[in-house]
Amino acid sequence: MGASQSDARDVATCLNLIPDSYTFIPVDLGNCCAHLFHRLEPDGFIMSQQSSQGVSRRGFLKGSGAAVAVSTVVSSTEAEAAAPGLQVVSGETSITLKVNGKSMTAKVEPRTTLLDVLRYQFDLTGAKPVSLGGSSGASTVLIGGKAVMASTTLALAVAGKEVTTCESLGGDAVPAAFVEHDAQQCGFCTPGFVVAVRAFLNKYPNATEEQIRAGLNGNICRCGTYANILQAVVSLVKGNSNG
Amino acid sequence: MKNFEYAQPTTEDEAVALLTEPKKDTAVLAGGTDLVGLMKRMVVTADRVVNISEIKSLQQVERDDNGSVWIGAAVCLGDFLDNRHTDQYPSTKQVIQGISSIQLQSQGTLVGELLRRPNCWYFREGHGLLADSGRMVNEGDNRYHAILGNRGPARFVNASRLAPSLITLGAQVRIIGPEKDEEQILELADLYRTPAADSELENVLQPGQFVTHVIIPTHGDRLTAAYEVRQGEGPDQPLAAAAVSIDVVAGTVQNASIVLGQVAPTPWIAREAAQLLCGKEVTEESAAMVGHQAVSGAMPLSQNEYKIQLAQVAVKRAVLKAAGYDTGGLDTPMPLEPTVSPSLETHIA
Ligand SMILES: Cc1cc2nc3c(=O)[nH]c(=O)nc-3n(C[C@H](O)C(O)[C@H](O)COP(=O)(O)OP(=O)(O)OC[C@H]3O[C@@H](n4cnc5c(N)ncnc54)[C@H](O)[C@@H]3O)c2cc1C
Ligand code: FES
């Protein structure tokens, strides 16, 4: 973000004149990210505008005889269940998530995102609602150790899985390095960055500076603290290779 | 988000059954990086969402007896990159390395990337794929829209960054549904179409059908490369892109395939340009000539004439990169020789 409409148009016009051998300088006017920071509605807000539309799955299940209990996804509207894989969930349902090592139960609708559950039911507000489509990376959490955006993950899809949020990384080396390198200004992006850095370094403990820049490009810092974030991550890599 | 029903099948058959519920608008969910955002914006308002990521048969990267590699629809971009079987496809890996974000690599799937919806801002703001039969795009801000294949009402560009390279590799997709046990193998290039009416999508999938695998044939001795012209380093759409696959015998190109991305409502297959390269040596000149030919039919809109030059350069640089020239571009060339270790090969049962 940052480039105004007219900046953007100027750049587009200039591109016309750029010679073949030109190497493009990164300028930040991403078309996918264009909506970032325009709309700050958390998912919960949008949800509250709609009424729940529970739909029975009976019609669908007619003719599929099997009845097997399901442990992870349980429809509250139906006591009996079909083959687990054929079960359809509608309306409100209880699910269990393993968050930061603890088993926690939430009431969710199919449209409830993991981010809604973490923030509004578990009061884990580290992961942030910034962009609707996950373009900011501010809602990053780990699922089974992999970095995903909680804002574009449906809660039902992670029922029974291990979720790690930034809240559990308090004693981790990553936030310590962020503090040491003054890697935040307003701090709104920091939890998302911290989790992304953790996942990134777990996978690439000896990353080069170039790889760090690339791997973390799914996180956006509106205050532009990138230089210090980079230093923090480089220091972690160095610490790692020095043993 | 509109509320919907949710299902998480564990087999392909269950998925087809769940997707073919009569009178229901169903959507396939993989990683959700694209779909969930579109549902929040109410651009997609499905009655039922079927999450295919827990289907075991879709979670593998496997090699069959012909050497083709099958990528299941639940395989994420990072797993494709890390898999040894895919080392023989450097051009596809180059593009995924460009999508670099750790979150997209572990959450987004390869098949979801091939089927992600267009980035056209009129579409994403809810004005439909054709945005009033092309009128809004024509009269509005069209700097990122199509320069080729834009004579009908569709002016968006196909969003997939991986499709061009996979098409040059001769990739196919396995599609199942809408009937139980119905299955077809389609050329990846034929998965895409240019919609001519509001009721049509940018792909040929019918309700109740979905892609289970992408099948990439063994690479042979082809030289491949992809080149994207990007304006930022983030996970963002390139302005123009090209992928190339060539067979070179004794310094002369025997066969060539060239596909452009981000220029048309479908990945754009530049057959005449590829033909032009055959029988020639790859030089700066021949590559430039091919680039010129690839965009010869371009019809820019009011604000995107600049894309013609970018597309032409993308083709030229992709050709040079495939032939091993150092192009001075943004990407570091990958080793062209595959390093598949035979002990790691698995076969489809
Ligand atoms: C901010 C942002 C920027 C991005 N920028 C880029 C970019 O520049 N380049 C890029 O390549 N990617 C980009 N992406 C990521 C893009 O969403 C993916 O690359 C990703 O791989 C999509 O996969 P998914 O599994 O998340 O798809 P989903 O969101 O689950 O699905 C995408 C679409 O495909 C359909 N679908 C999925 N699987 C199937 C199937 N098996 N059969 C039939 N239909 C199916 C869905 O119904 C949906 O319409 C970006 C994402 C975000 C959030
Ligand atoms: S520190 Fe303010 S957004 Fe990053």
Image (cartoon, rainbow, N blue to C red):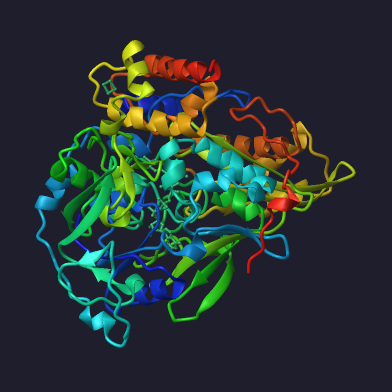
Residue at the image point whose x is 79% and y is 34% from the top: B283
Residue at the image point whose x is 32% and y is 68% from the top: B26
Q: In the rendered view, tell whether residue B46 sits above or below residue B165.
A: below
Q: Position of residue B166 (x, y in %)?
A: 60, 52
Can you name the residue that lies furthest to the right here? B250
Q: Quadrant of ligand 2?
A: top left
Asked if residue B30 can be seen in this view, the reply is: yes
Residue at the image point whose x is 35% and y is 47% from the top: B137
Q: Is A141 situated left or right of B270 in this image?
A: left
Q: Quadrant of the N terminus of chain B?
A: bottom left
Q: Position of residue B190 (x, y in %)?
A: 56, 64
Residue closer to the observer: B130 or B72: B72
Residue at the image point whose x is 44% and y is 64% from the top: B55
Asked if residue B295 can be seen in this view, the reply is: no
Q: In the rendered view, tell whether residue A6 sits above or below residue B83.
A: above
Q: Is B129 situated left or right of B222 in this image?
A: left
Residue closer to the observer: A74 or B16: A74
